[in-house]
Image (spheres, grey):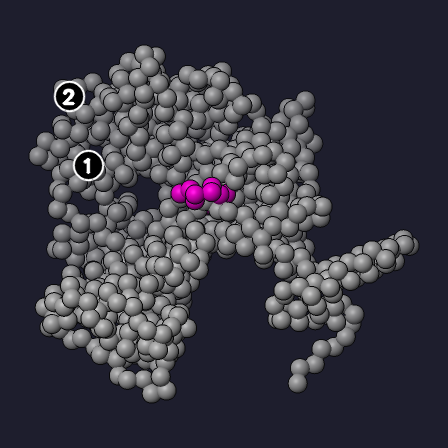
Amino acid sequence: MTAHTDLEGTLKVLPEPSHRLLEVVATEYASLTAEYGPRNVLVLKRHPAGLERVREQLAGETTDGTPLSPRLESLPEHASKVLEEYDPTLDRLEYEERIELISLVIAGAKREIPPYLEGAREHETFARDVGQLLLEVTRQRIRHADCADAHDCLAFLTAMNDRFHEVLDDRGLIERADVIPRVVELLQADADGLRTRITGSYDAVLALEFEEYRRLDREYLAQLTWETDTNTELVCLGERHASVERTRVESGRLEDLSSGLTVEEVDSPTVRTRDDSRSHSHSQSPPHRGITRYLATGEPPASDEQATARRIRAGTAREQVRQVAAEIQFLVDRHEWSHDEIAVAVPSVDRVPDARTGLRNAGIPTATIGTDSLKEDPAVNELYAVVSAYCDHDVELAHERLAARVPGVETPAESAPTPTPTPTSAFESHPQSHSRSQPTPESPDTHDPPSATISEVLESCADASVRRSLENWIVRTELKRRIAEEESWVDAAEQYQGVRRVLEIARFVEETDLVAPDWEGLRRMLRQTIKYDAPYVHDVETRSPTGGVTVCAIEDLKYDSREAVFLLDCTDGAYPGQQHLTQLFPTAWLKSMPQYPAVTDPDRESLERTFAPRARARAAKSDAAPRHGDPFAAYHAERSRRALALGTRAARSQLYCCTYERETEGLRRTHDQSRYLTLLESVPTIGFEDVDALGREAAIHGEANALEALLDEPRGELERILREASTGGEADLGETEALFEEIQVVLEEGDVDDDLARAVRTQFEFAAGEVVRRE
């Protein structure tokens, strides 16, 4: 059958990123449901981020009072369900399994590994970078045959990816990146009448975030809406100057995606929602709307339109987060906003763990639940120590770590050898496993007396199955209870997720023939996963029982809106940054790799067509035409500028841009402010209000903030007195003496940790210029 890839329908275009985007979505959805009914309208959003915010906007009632329950899914989620309908027996390849399979395929390669890759394997991020590259190769259906004349490193990796997918096919597995390409092929062939069945379940499709639909995404959409016997209406909604992800791999503007579509302009300021009362407060233009427009399109605010935002300038990245935490609490107290109405955005997902931890240490609840790198998870480290002990690997160290984690157990002077079950099969019966229904002193259903040793606990948990042994340990040592008692709600949720991942790895080890179904096989795979695990590969976003601030990568705010948004790390090192695509290859190599699955060789024409920097300069009435310099760097810098624009759009009331200092030559420090903030400052109608959140007379929240504030007092007071003296002023020493006396009383009479008391006294000694000697 001839593939049908042309889209037929309407493309509704917003001229620029609009703060009323969700209202436009609701209006288009209401129009379709009025004609076809809510169950006959399928809404597809390209990326899953922001899906729940869209669902909230679409939920409501029809004109006859019937509740609206939108059929809303992300494109990958919908494709996954279509594949399941075609073949329910296909298993999705999990992240941990993918790491193991790729490493085995590369290790068993018959092709010679290029010397550059051989050396790069020593770098910590090598496996992660290779994995990301191969994911993109898979998404774009790039084969080794397409890269036969490519750089030897790229040719080798695409050959390994082909071999990797041959192994997956043999095992009846599919990785998530291959779902959309596979389903496109099935729909084109109408395999077993799949396309006919799928397209018969709806009458209209509303495609959101159309500016981010890649080539295969558009082909998938064409298959969903093309059927000779039906007349499915397709409405696509896109924003100009808003594509960040698609332009990473495809150049071109939104209109370039409209082949076969009728293009209609949408004037967002005139749009109204079904429920004006609910959206009225959100319809007002935010004070920084001109900033969003200028970053996205280059059009400055009108002479009578002042655009403003707030700026936090800190000395370090850590202090930046402390100031943000203090300002968040100030906003919550002043405006009575909930923490749910505030978001903190970072340039990349790798920065989420540090930012979130810093906020929580400062007493700010966060709503983002995820999985840090497994090596940073205490519960995972405990289970890894259990596995090491059963392997007789670093037994003494493993026993020490377990004894430190589990209360009521001890490490004897001469630990008895740890029993190691060695079944011929992971599912072979074991005498001990039959006695679980009869509680005995060795049964996991009884708790150890305080005098139990680690060896005795391990012996009582040992089972023929590695997974059941770990489950026995979890139950017998009450790991989940310990997590719940010792950790905050968010930390506990993350550690429970880490425990589940370890048990899933144990299950995979028992069921696969890739590794031995024993402790050595589990230790190998767990070590691989911990070593190459990336922060937030498995992240989810949820709400804690008390609510919390969302901490996310800036691109996740594209279809979101909050009362206040803090953009962290607004430095030139992040916006635009330098490593635009990957750390795997030098930038000079990327520019000479046309087969690399991203835009690596843009010319000035594609740069202008995609981002229109010269037209933007004319709109800003700039006399100086932009100098593109290196087209590669200029192209991806424009993507970064767009991401920043979309982040600013998410704020309804308050926008904060946050920067910090960095070292330059010698010991000199300077604010590393993004060039885009500097550009904004040069526009007469755009202004920034500098905020010193820590300088306010405000309550200190969080134990970490209280400790840092206390330790800062001696040096801070000394610097205040010196500033007064250097400017001819008079410092009030009485106020300083009273403050120090209060601190002294607390140190002597309060319930203060000895180490903290010594740290405070040391700060006084340093401030006084004394040299502290350690004996």
The local crowd at label 1, few if under 14, some if 14 to 19, many if 20 or more residues have their Cα within 10 Å, is many
Q: Residue at x 68, y 46 (%)?
A: 698
Magenta-span inclusion, residue 552: yes
Q: Give residue 70's quadrant in the image.
A: top left
Q: Is residue 208 visible?
A: yes
Say the numbered circle drawn on residue 565: none
Say the numbered circle drawn on residue 228: 2
Q: Secondary structure at mark 2?
A: loop
- Looking at this view, name the residue that lies furthest to the top: 64
Q: Is residue 294 visible?
A: no
The local crowd at label 2, few if under 14, some if 14 to 19, many if 20 or more residues have their Cα within 10 Å, is few
Q: Give residue 76's quadrant in the image.
A: top left
Image location of residue 419, percent across then percent down? 22, 79
Q: Secondary structure at mark 1?
A: helix
Task: Point out the stretch of residues depicted in magenta.
Answer: 542-553
- Residue type at mark 2? Thr
Magenta-span inclusion, residue 763: no
Image location of residue 253, percent across then percent down? 42, 32
Callout in the foreground (2, 1)? 1
Q: Which of the image's four quarters has the N terminus?
A: top left
Q: In the image shown, does 500 or 624 lie closer to the viewer?
A: 500
Q: Residue at x 57, y 24 (%)?
A: 285
Image location of residue 8, percent across then percent down? 27, 22
User: Seen in the image, is 263 located left or right of residue 445?
Assistant: right
Say the numbered circle drawn on residue 82: 1
Tell me, yes or no, whether the two marked residues, 2 and 1, touch with CB atoms within 8 Å.
no
Q: Earlier in the sequence, mark 2 or mark 1?
A: 1
Provide the major secondary structure of the magenta segment.
loop
Q: Residue at x 16, y 57 (%)?
A: 167
